[in-house]
Amino acid sequence: MLRKATQDDLPALVALRCKAARTNRTDAAGWLQNVAGLENILLLVKSGAPPAAMLAAVPVEYGQHHGVWLCGLAGEQGVPLDRLLPKLLESCLRAYGASGFDFAVMTPEGAQHADALKQLGFTAQLPLRVLQTPIRRDLLAQASFDSLTVHKLLEMRHIYQPGCITLPESAMNEIMTQLYRRGLTVVSNRRGYGLYYTSGDTLQFLELQADNDHCADRLLQAAREKTGAANARILLAESQTLYLGAGRRCGYGMLAFLGKPFPVTDAYFRMLL
């Protein structure tokens, strides 16, 4: 039986989330309540038993189009998620399409999962590029660190990516709080920003937005002067103009239309967490 989650389900869902996402109880509860929203979590249950599996269908926006981000799949040990997922997704897509939603997005976990999504009408329209590059030193590179509010960060993101598929600001607040707890740093100036972790001699950029390659280089250089890390691994949207043509393509987001198709050439999908 499928039903929506309630507050009474939270302890069981926290346990499922902790195991699936390899996270702690605080972050699991924060994601369930403040990012997904309990009212958006679908449960597979047997009468009188705790939830056996869950899937979140989180409302998102792309311009004037309303969509759902399908995420947070988790199940009890022994539950055949690979077999149940196609039927669960098919039911979700049909229900949300009938409710007036325009599209669904999802990030597959591996090639087998991606193939299953293709059978349900998803296409790989939201790929990323990964670029690995040394960072040239520049002692004069200027930037601020961890000074952007989430509101300002979202404003800048929309300037650089007007086709961004978005969550509410309250959800992004929770995401950024969790990323900061994990060691994220935000480097920014008036010409762009970047979100990165330091891993040894490499800066792992989850996102980098800037006016042009030179402005992006200045952000990297400022981060090098702060951390001493001499290399960067940068995730970019495939269509992003920064370092155009450089790096290798890697899969990320897949999209399915739930009604009449519409152009998504400028769509940008990065949920970060």
Image (cartoon, rainbow, N blue to C red):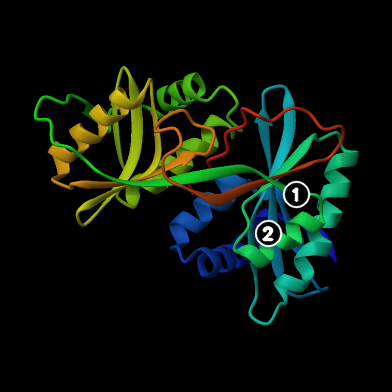
Place of residue 165 in the rendered image (x, y in percent of width and height, measured from the top left): 61, 33
Residue type at numbered disc 2: Ala
Which numbered dot is residue 122?
1
Q: Mark 2 to mark 1: distance in Å?
A: 8 Å
* Total numbered labels: 2
**CB-based contact (under 8 Å), mark 2 and mark 1:** yes
**Which residue is more in the foreground, 35 or 203?**
203
Q: Is residue 1 above or below residue 252?
A: below
Residue at the far front in the pictured view: 245
SS for callout 2:
helix
Residue located 81% across and 58% down the image: 119
Q: For residue 51, say whether it is visible.
A: no
Q: Considering only order in the chain, which callout, 1 or 2, is on the residue closer to the N terminus?
A: 2
Residue located 12% across and 30% down the image: 138
Q: Which residue in the protein does label 2 denote? A: 114
Q: Is residue 268 left or right of residue 82?
A: left
Q: For residue 112, say whether it is visible.
A: yes
